[in-house]
Image (cartoon, coloured by chain):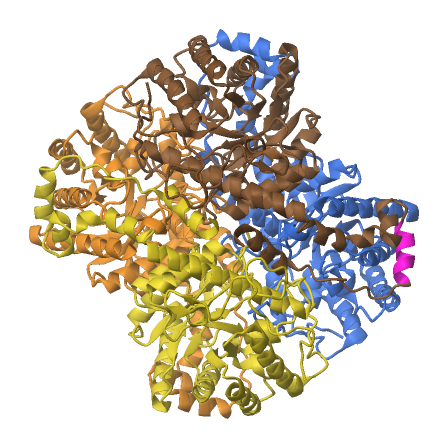
Chain colours: A brown, B blue, C orange, D yellow
Amino acid sequence: MAYFENIGKVAYEGSQSQNPFAFKFYNADEVVAGKKMSEHLKFSMAYWHTLTAEGNDPFGDTTAIRPWHSYKGMDMAKARVEAGFEFMDKMGLEYFCFHDIDITPEGSTLKEFFANIDTIVDLIETHMKSTGKKLLWNTANMFTNPRFVHGAASTNNADVYAHAAAQIKKGLEVGKRLGGENYVFWGGREGYMSLLNTDMKLEQDNIARMFHMAVDYAKEIGFDAQFLIEPKPKEPTKHQYDFDAATSIAFLQKYNLDKDFKLNLEANHATLAGHTFEHELRVARINGMLGSLDANQGDMLLGWDTDEFPVNVYDSTLTMYEVLKNDGLGKGGINFDAKVRRDSFEADDLFLAHIAGMDTYAKGLKVAAKLIEDGAFDKVIEERYSSFSEGIGADIVAGKTTLASLSEYAMNNENPRPNKSGRQELLQAVLNQYIYG
Amino acid sequence: MAYFENIGKVAYEGSQSQNPFAFKFYNADEVVAGKKMSEHLKFSMAYWHTLTAEGNDPFGDTTAIRPWHSYKGMDMAKARVEAGFEFMDKMGLEYFCFHDIDITPEGSTLKEFFANIDTIVDLIETHMKSTGKKLLWNTANMFTNPRFVHGAASTNNADVYAHAAAQIKKGLEVGKRLGGENYVFWGGREGYMSLLNTDMKLEQDNIARMFHMAVDYAKEIGFDAQFLIEPKPKEPTKHQYDFDAATSIAFLQKYNLDKDFKLNLEANHATLAGHTFEHELRVARINGMLGSLDANQGDMLLGWDTDEFPVNVYDSTLTMYEVLKNDGLGKGGINFDAKVRRDSFEADDLFLAHIAGMDTYAKGLKVAAKLIEDGAFDKVIEERYSSFSEGIGADIVAGKTTLASLSEYAMNNENPRPNKSGRQELLQAVLNQYIYG
Amino acid sequence: MAYFENIGKVAYEGSQSQNPFAFKFYNADEVVAGKKMSEHLKFSMAYWHTLTAEGNDPFGDTTAIRPWHSYKGMDMAKARVEAGFEFMDKMGLEYFCFHDIDITPEGSTLKEFFANIDTIVDLIETHMKSTGKKLLWNTANMFTNPRFVHGAASTNNADVYAHAAAQIKKGLEVGKRLGGENYVFWGGREGYMSLLNTDMKLEQDNIARMFHMAVDYAKEIGFDAQFLIEPKPKEPTKHQYDFDAATSIAFLQKYNLDKDFKLNLEANHATLAGHTFEHELRVARINGMLGSLDANQGDMLLGWDTDEFPVNVYDSTLTMYEVLKNDGLGKGGINFDAKVRRDSFEADDLFLAHIAGMDTYAKGLKVAAKLIEDGAFDKVIEERYSSFSEGIGADIVAGKTTLASLSEYAMNNENPRPNKSGRQELLQAVLNQYIYG
Amino acid sequence: MAYFENIGKVAYEGSQSQNPFAFKFYNADEVVAGKKMSEHLKFSMAYWHTLTAEGNDPFGDTTAIRPWHSYKGMDMAKARVEAGFEFMDKMGLEYFCFHDIDITPEGSTLKEFFANIDTIVDLIETHMKSTGKKLLWNTANMFTNPRFVHGAASTNNADVYAHAAAQIKKGLEVGKRLGGENYVFWGGREGYMSLLNTDMKLEQDNIARMFHMAVDYAKEIGFDAQFLIEPKPKEPTKHQYDFDAATSIAFLQKYNLDKDFKLNLEANHATLAGHTFEHELRVARINGMLGSLDANQGDMLLGWDTDEFPVNVYDSTLTMYEVLKNDGLGKGGINFDAKVRRDSFEADDLFLAHIAGMDTYAKGLKVAAKLIEDGAFDKVIEERYSSFSEGIGADIVAGKTTLASLSEYAMNNENPRPNKSGRQELLQAVLNQYIYG
């Protein structure tokens, strides 16, 4: 049976197509920079936004109209699996991601919860085998249940901490079983609401302890997924410990976890932290920490995580630019952590929104590849820093100078002027020309 | 002669005084938490805001009326020294801080600049000896001169880099000569205007190289000041590399500089980065990185560095709370990196503003000391995390658990609930009661 | 029976009390500026936050523990009425406010909804008579139900518009019956998610039409409450039409509604719009539009409506300063549109939070009254603008000048200088002295 | 002689051109939507950013390298005129805008200032006649000189107010002489630094008085330019009275100035106020207040007015969409209130930046025209609101309904559901397709 009866496989029809249910730019098999688009763009369906979300917001009840609404409980959970694989198939998405509570009701005990998970994972596994779809990553939701009100690994309640550990253990086992390529930690409530009642050091130490236990357990069971932390600066808490890429790196370095983890970076989280997405990607990249992407976009005038589908080609271009410069994402991929607007409540909107996002990334990939192929920015940068390739500059880079030697040099080289304009406006115009020229 | 003729020594007159030129809360010799206020509060005059600034802004010319305006060039530089020591004396400030270009004109060559510095430093040294005033820290200004348009240690021009090195070398020598307790690096233009033309990795590597050279040179000349980085997220650049405390710590860890540096934290920089000041202090404190303070406050509705005098007692209380918990600031102090509003253009306003700031910190110190003495928050926190002091919680903290052992525990301990309200509102009411009860 | 069994009447015990369940500053019968505190501070319980809310957030399920949780449906609705009056009684709150859907389930038809309302309003009325509690205002919730996904008076669906009209009509009737002193319109979804699909002019015209119909109907039934618009800039929509005080005034002026409406201003909405609360109050006051307050506070570093209990005495002082300058709020009052933090989930926290808020306002009232009594700011302002009381300044104010006459004056009066410092830092210090001196 | 010797006339070379000094999209004579591009896009050179600015910022001295730097005083003023007309000629800009102090030194008296103005205006007039260039608008700078530290029309000093009046009078005379099509008021310091010392009502009344005098004087001398207010929310003051479009409209309505003024809207000011530029344009448009544009863009992550050249084609498309829907800007135009980045300090950057901006607007115009021609959004909107074209909806719009009649209708029309998805993601994808498809 089909859940999305009136929609067929979404096909590439080119940039002039008037068909809303066709790709205008994403052409899976088209080769860009030596690889198929689908290999560059390991798009993933976010189980929660596509299958679990219902269109409620803090001021309004659910609006979503979904074809599995006639089912309840475990039946609905199963229907969602069916619908999800149909959706991936029709959209041409090769990957998916989920939290444990996305795929099944929690039940009233951990035992029941894990049994429910097993039931649904059986079904998912069957579908994976028959379709070839893959698990980009899974994770444990440790922020929705009221027990996590004070955090999970950062909770003040050791029993809650143990509960979180049990969920992570199960998550790792599920990941191994389904061949998950990564395993993600988003610390939804790992942070604080008020410093007045918070022991920040104990909380961060405990988080590190949990991560070490997770690393150890993954090794124990032979689960070789890439571990990922997902930075976010705030929301739901006042302050989240994994504020941004740099903060997460500081944490991982301090606790000797930097060899075991990379970062899962999200566009909207970047801007909430006061950064562009490309900044976060660059920081991760030059630190060898670029793991995977949560593709979405925020509204720069709104102060919460709007998780909009990515439709800005400037952003997708600069994102794919960093990804290409990183030689790809390794095990990572591009997960649509994006939700349709509450007023886009029809099931069709799920397709339309993914098309919008995939096309935006496809266009961005092509522009980025061309920029790199032409050296549009690289040549400028190479020339710009050329003074560090010779003479005193080369000595500096080689570590051959001291304050004394540089000072002597400077005293004999009065009034150095900046040697060249930064040419920002020209480079922005070049970017425009590549995008829509 | 006196520059501030009509103003005498500012004295403590108590909270009911109607004298604008008296302290209402700052009583230097009053003992709080076992030490004199003046020992807790090593207040420092910021040379630039007090003596050099002229009240211009991006949309308006200078408004300040200053008693040294009849002088020019080096004469004005000397007059400022005289006026500065008079100001410190009358205000009861024991410390001061300066950038190299605050104290003297740059001249047309480095040689001339350094000669000018020597002349003024002679004069400063004389005044220090006769008055007992001390240098909290000095630094090199490597952002105002056009040569630093693309950065100093992060410049693309090796000659500019060498010039910066020369300034730092001189700065360290001046610091040693004047017995500076700290030496500060604020990377005014160490960051980028556009990622499109920026080699972030080379720039950060070069900054680290400069810092290592500075550490080496200080050791070489026997200058044992505490080195400090001052985080700021943006302005004047689009992005400053020392974004916030955590980012700076990540940098120092990566480049093996974390033993040689601490942080000079500024309130307004904290809020520009999306943090409360107490958050930044806490982060630094639990990482052993709390060095010194730039005391001021921003306007939470304005997006630039307003550097206002600190007049919010909530902030000063939580600031001093962290300082007391840190057992003080060591070599660090409390520098008023704060400027009078452009429309507070009379010389009197310099006094009124410092009084406002010092009183605010004095009140904050007293409230914080009492909160700690009473265990007002400590008792709550101790109780709140008590589950980690025994049983499974103690095992977690002791590193005796694994995911498997915790999972087994959790399976036999269904549905842990959060064990207690966080009581934020009560704690906020307690804070109010301590402040104005 | 009692819902809050272990809590008695909250009494004033003075600023040194250690009893968390006592007022430290709010002393209802104490006379301040010629009136009892309780007359200045017409505090109101917000039905929704106190009785209906359950402690969920966009990332987490309900945490609240409430004594009426053993009931369901209309029984729970009735229990809430009982509990609410008990709460008001114990807290010493004389007023309350509600949306229609706060007090009763909606049922499956409008008819059933209105019947439910009637049932509960009967019960409320009985309690009002026996306790003397009063209705500060009521309103219709036209944003939670999915039918309002595209707005209510700004919907694109005429049937939804009619439905909204029916709710307003019922709301006005309920208000009249319960003697409501005001009637509020908060346009929860009156705005847009995207300009791409929005006819802004039609939407605003339709809102104005609805308001005129409401004004007419109130007159028709003899309901003489003050009508109030509640500005908010965004959330849940991307842009709310009643962005701030000035925007709302522009709307009311344009559509000839400015004689029939005033503003219900909320602190957190002010800061979301980029204003201080005192700014919004001032704008409303000098335009004769200051109607009523939604007392709360936001977190200046968070971009959503946190609706925290007001605990900042700077804010409450400047708020009450504007209220006193307005000769009070007339029919308006001070409604606690504030919710306990999600992790303050115990019923006790409702009391603790209201105590915190009421004490904060009480302290603010006392400080503001003293500031006005002493002319602490008034004298400065009078002196500051004195040049407009005489000579050319008086002529300007009297409308006797022209560009030509002023130009001639100026040509003969070269280089006017600003005549005096604005003395901001001094005034801030004075404010501090009044608050905690 | 030529100031920009090595640069010729910038010509259109098409989207594939590799010549940095050519237009890729702006083709002045190309007809779009029935008019030449140059008629749609009345581009104007901003005298201040192009000719007067020197590349300083709050943390750094001037960096700009300009060919008129060998001159001083009035000679430099004259050289700037020559260079400006050469620049306009080479860039193909038909209009320019200036503040009084942009074109000439102030001198030491008003008399001298006005004489200087007359000298330069003579020169400008000569060039205008010989080149056909036109004055889009002029204005008086009443914020840079220290005398305006407390405001101009909102000053507390009547003498300063008179001085401002004299400058406005002169500005109107200059505007008339040069055939200025508009006259602008940007209230640089019309606002407040602190409410504690501010009489907001008197200040706003005085501003209104000044505007009425200006209207009267313009009529008196027969100057029929369109008067324009330029909203900005903050900077340099903490709060500017002309916060945004709606606030300015409220002010104009209140003081009966709404027939005499329209708005000069700036993109960066819009975003500083928390709005998209298209929002501000829409608000102005549906209120008949859309006058002219200050074209630039801000950095959404920076909180100050960065005045960057507009290079975002999403923004330029939505801007030109509103302009086309407004049937153009009437007397208004598109002034580049944009400055090259401080590190784009070469004179060439002035050309490169204007090319970037003009191309961005040209592309936006073409996309917007096509969107309108195809009814890409219009058809969706028409369909979306169709329920207000018939039946009960038509009655509502016609004013034939009451709360009672609508309530009766609703009672017989249970549970209206939202009739259709808002389709935001689809419309965003359509926009992308039009931009780069």
Quadrant housing the N terminus of chain C? top left
Residue at (61% x, 65% y) in the render: D352
Relative to D330, is B384 above or below? above
Q: Is residue B345 left or right of residue C128?
A: right
Residue C269 shown in magenta: no
Residue D233, percent from left and from top: 45, 62
Choose between C207 and A164: the one closer to the eye. C207
- Which span of residues is magenta-colored? A402-411
Residue B101, percent from left and from top: 77, 64
Residue at (25% x, 64% y) in the render: C253
Circle count:
0
Residue D256, percent from left and from top: 28, 74
Relative to A143, is B366 above or below? below
Choose between A379 and A251: the one closer to the eye. A379
Relative to C51, is D382 above or below? below
Q: Is residue D38 left or right of residue B388?
A: left
Residue D19, percent from left and from top: 63, 63
Q: Is residue C133 left or right of residue C428?
A: left
| Residue A229 visible at all | yes
Main SS of the magenta part reads helix
